[in-house]
Structure formats: C-alpha cells, structure tokens
Image (cartoon, rainbow, N blue to C red):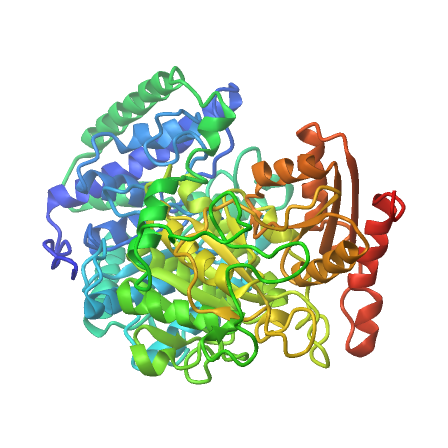
Amino acid sequence: MPAAPSSEAALPPGLGDQDFLDLFEAQVLSRQADLAARRLGASGRGFYSIGSSGHEGNVALSAATRITDPVLPHYRSGAFFIHRARRAGVADPVRDLLMGVVAAAADPISGGRHKVFGSAAANIVPQTSTIASQLPRAVGLAFALDRADRLGVRCPWPSDAVVLCGFGDASANHSTAAGAINTAVHTAHLGIPVPVLFLCEDNGIGISVPTPPDWIEHAYGHRPGLRWFAADGGDLRAAVTTSTAAIDWVRAHRRPAFLHLRTVRLFGHAGSDVETAYRETAAIEADLARDPVTATARFLVGAGIRTPRELLGHYDHLADRVAATAEEVCREPKLTTAEAVMAPSAPAHPDRVHDDAQCRNPRRPVTAASTPPPHRTADGHSAVAAHGTVAAHGGGGAQDPNSETLAQAVNRTLAELLARDPDVLVFGEDVARKGGVYGVTKGLRKRFGPRRVFDTLLDEQSVLGTALGTGLAGFVPIPEIQYLAYVHNALDQLRGEAATLSFFSAGRYRNPMVVRIAGYAYQRGFGGHFHNDNSVAALRDIPGMIVASPARPDDAAAMLRTCVSAARVDGRVCVFLEPIALYHTRDLHEPGDGQWAQAAADPAHVPIGRARVYGDGTDLTIVAFANSVPMSLRVARRLTQRGFGVRVLDLRWLCPLPHADLIRHAEATGRVLIADETRHSGGVSESVCAALVDAGFTGALARVTSVDSFVPLGPAAATVLLNESDIEAAADRLLPVDGA
C-alpha cells in the first residue's frame, strides 16, 4: 500500500516573532540540559554523554523541515531534537533527554540503554555511533522512499520526504561518510531519486585535532552532482533561510545536497575532557564569543522582539525548570536484569515466524507430509541414515531432472519470495545482470525487474547501508556480500548500526534484513584468502544477530524462508552463510551418485536454532556444519562399515546454536567429535564445546579444526584446512578398538 501523502508544509523562511522565540527557547533548553548533565555526572548520578553546546544553531533545520522528514541526527543535536519533538507533540523533550543521561528505564527512546537523540513521534532515528556510520543508512532510506511509493510498499514516510543526516567535520573524513556521499552522488547520476541532505556541523575540531577552516568546502563544496549550501549556525535568521532553501531544493529535485553549518564547540568534547590541555586560551575565548545562544538573544533584542530584562528572566526561568527536572529524573528506576537489557536485541515470535514462512510457500500445504521418512530431526525434517543413503529424497541421482543443487535451491526460493512478497528486494555487486558470480541470482532481474533486483556499487558499506535504509522504509532487503572476507570491509554496518538500532530504540525502530554471503573455503583452483575465507567469529559475536549456515539444498531453501520471515515478523538481522564449494555439488559418495542434489520439494520452514541429524548410531556423534557435513557423512559411512554406530549432527544455525539438539544427541552416544572447518582459535567449535560443558556433559569430547592461518592459493590450501582424514583420525581416537 502506498504511503499517505505529506500533510504538513515546512515552516516558512519568513518566521514570525513567536517562531523565533520558540527556536531561542529550544536553544536555551538544550544548553541547560547540557549543564544539568554535567552536574549529574559530577555528582555520580548521571553517566557519559556528549553535549550540544555551541551547536544550537542546528535548531534551524527543525524550522526548515517537515515533521514527516526522517532524521538521522548528529550527536550534538540537542536544540534540533527539542524543537522537533515539541512540534511533534512530545510534552517534555528535556525530561526525555535527561532520562537518557541518568539511564532511566522509562527513557522513551532507549529504555535506559544509552543517551541518544531519537523519537518515533518526531521521526528521529537514533544515532548509534559517533563516526558518521549512519550515513550509508541515510542514503539507503532516501533511495527507498521513491521505490516504496512505486512498488506500493507501505512506508512510514511520505514519498516526497527528505532525509536529513547530520555529522561533524571530523567524521566527514571517515571512509564511511566519504563512501556514503559517493554512493548518493553516483546513484543520483544514474537518474535514481536520492533525496538526502547531508548536514555537516563544522565546529573546527575533532576531539583534539583541528579541522582546517577551508577543508569541508574544499572536500565537498565543488563536487559535481552534490548541491552545496553554507550557513553560519551563529546567525539563526540566516541559518533558517539557508536551511529552508537546502531542504526545498532537495525536495524539489530529489537529489543529494550538502549543507555546511558553521558552529563552535563549547565546554570540550565530552564528559571530563579538558580543552586547555590541547587548545590555546585565545581559541577557546574566540569560540565563546560566537556562542549561538547569546547571538540569538542579541538578535531578539535588536529586532525589538524582547527586551534584555525579559530574555534574562525567561532564561533564568528555563534554567530553574531544567534543574528541577534533572532532580526528578534521578529518582527514576533503572534497568535491573540482563533479560530487560537484552529484550530488544533478539525479539522472537516463533509461531508467527512459522506461520509467515508457511503461508509464503506455494508448493505445499501447511499440513505435514502423510508418510514421514525413516530418519528425521525433532522438527520433522528429513535426514540421511548413518550408512550414507539419502532418506526421503529417493533416487534423485544426477540424472533426475527434478533434482537441484544448493545454488539452484537458493535461486528458486528467492524467486518464490520475490513473486509472493512485494516487500522483498534482492541486490548486491553483480547480482542483477550477471546473476551473481556463481549464478545464484541468475534470471531474477529479468523476471522481476530492476526495481526489485538490482546491482550496487563495489562498496560493502553501501550495500549494507542500502539494506539498513530500505529496511527502515518497510522492505525486507536481501543484500548479497560477494565473499565472506568482504563483509569485514563493512562489519560496523552490521555491528554498530544494524544490531544496535533496536537496542538503542527499545524496538521502536528495526533493521529487518537477510544478508546473503558466499563463504567458507574449499574452492579448488580459485581465489586465495579473499575468496576462500573461513572466519566467522566476528559475525557470531554480535548480540541478537542470526547466523544461518545451510549445507543441503532443502535446508538452504527452508532456512532462507525462515530468515526472511524472522526479519519481517521480528525485525531480525540475519546473516545467511552459503558454502561456495557446495553451490553446484550433486554427489556425496561417488561420482554420479547424485545424493547431494535433491528434489525441489523442501519444508517451508526450519525453526531457528534447530539442528538436523543424520542417522541414529549410538557410538559417536559428529557435530558438523557447512562443508564439514558431507565430509562427516563420508567418514560416518566408513566407520559404519567397520561396525560402529555413528550419527552426524548438522548444526545448521551458528547463532543461536541448537543447544537442546546438541545436548540430546551428545548424550545419546556419550562421545562427541566436532568437525569444524573454521579456525582453531575463534572457531565455531569453541562455542560448541562450551555449550556442552556448561550443560554438564561428561562424555568424551574432542574437536578437529582448520589451523590458525589464512587460506593460501592452490594445493597449499590443503595443508591448513580441515579434511576427511583429520575427521576420521580424530573419530578413531574417540571410538573403542574395532570389534570391542
């Protein structure tokens, strides 16, 4: 359903006396909130927060924008926040800010988890970092507004909205900022609407490092495709006029623009920072002389709007009111349990996820199959017997025209999701025209069009930023990162932005997405460490993130549906790790047996955190995932031929681990071998061992892994990667002597 049209016009540039008084009051309240925060910190009742003093000129952007324009603010946006929140009907924005300072559980945006500027009512998306990491998200959101309107996807913002994104002069030098601005300009160059205004609040210093006075204009003022505006934040009337012109230009042209707002920084960077340790006294005094609150007061007096006595009286009244509020919020309860702290990070409604996944599968009814196969997981998923024959997939073989590989299963499932869900987008480097490096997305662009399936820049930060923005706008994005090693180029977009947004907004804003990543090693004759990477530790360490890792075609299809439904229902951030070496694999034991390719008839849903078991042997449980699953199955068949009963447990989910299934199958045999293709240090097996030990498992336990090395090119890769011989030798050490 298309978004509703905008109902509110921007405040006019010719503001009346009361409008300027309201702006001045927001500036004063912001300044007093900063001073109160410093007093609270000094008394031990408040916690780390960064002040907005000297940046109060950003209140002009509140006057220039509509409430329906989404904002990703700078971390010194106190005056902007107070004025915008009051326009949106928030009763006491200062109280809201100070509840963040004292980490009160009733803080209406973060719920006591951090002091951030954010408000669902005022359409202010809280910033989760201080280094411009929100810029890729802002570009993605601007990109999504027109797309949502054209595709009929319900969006929280009107199609004529402008995205406002604030950051500092030091952050403007960060690669994230440079990449995001480049993406906006490049996208607009292609004729695609990107209505974003980049607001650089330039106070001339980054913590202690000066920014040359002409640097921001030199870097961005003459860039083709980026409209330039500049204003002095100390001159409120001029700042409102220029800000309104900038917003109006972006709204009319749907192209990116850059507003350079000159500000000052008063009272140091943050907390206990002492400026005199690194700044000359004359420079500090020069900034004080440019105090924007004082400048606005002078303007109000000079314009005859208020007398000095009236302004001073009002200032003192506001200061007293803020001080009283600061005392009140100190009595607010704090978060007291780990469960309360973590609640927004990993919301879970498994029944709703199940229903969402089921109703989007066109190939089978919700009811279960009438004849179950002989070996199944606890969730009813078909399995392979310990002797290695495929159960419930019957004679597919290499010649079965209905069988499909893992790559084909992912392709088919993406097509089904795109066909049935108008909110799904598929994009990434080489995803559209080429169909992916391995053909996994082949044909999707032709079938569903470039608005649903499209190529991106060669920039992982922009790929993930597009997902972050489109997720905010009502889509369920499925971006692709071409190789596992490349996600590390942009990991903060997952860790610092995607995973933290629900945490810092108490679930009021979400990042639904499923990030497909081609990964792991074992590609023969190709790559090197960038194309054969087995490091997943950084992904598994991110709170609340789901990491799926299918090995078989039917699991890949069903787990992809589950991830999409978890993103849609619970706003979850999911990473879908696809083993490259298994993309086109058809055989399991011998060439031509076709026992890894499967018929295109898979379950609609695999519950998050449920493993898959192959066989029911009672002598040994081999725990595996991804490439180690077929290796372990071949080892299991050889061990079975020697008289041992072996079962193979495919974890399928690396986060959260399938704890219940893991413990049950470990106890069933009393012996556990973990076949881990990731590295010895920081690999998956460390967490599996810890889970078993924490659960009180007292049986025999061992692990075999790849070594702590990057993966080299060519035959040398075999010297550092886990192989079947390693698995079998480790199994022999755990099992009793043959025939015993």
Image quarter of the C terminus: top right
Position of 700 relative to 649 (above/below): above
Q: How many marks?
A: 0
User: Relative to the observer, which residue lies in front, 349 or 394?
Assistant: 394
x then y, percent, for residue 143? 32, 68
User: Relative to the observer, which residue lies in front, 62 or 506?
Assistant: 506
x then y, percent, for residue 319? 31, 25
Figure quadrant of residue 109: top left
x then y, percent, for residue 397? 56, 75
- Report the side of 154 relative to 681 (left or right): left
- Report the side of 255 relative to 497 (left or right): left
Figure quadrant of residue 601: bottom left
Figure quadrant of residue 659: top right
Position of 247 relative to 459 (above/below): above
Residue 230 makes an appearance in the image: no
Q: Residue furthest right?
A: 737
Going 44% across and 80% down the picture, which residue do you hit? 442
User: Relative to the observer, which residue lies in front, 432 or 76?
Assistant: 432
x then y, percent, for residue 138? 37, 60
Residue 394 makes an appearance in the image: yes
Image quarter of the N terminus: bottom left
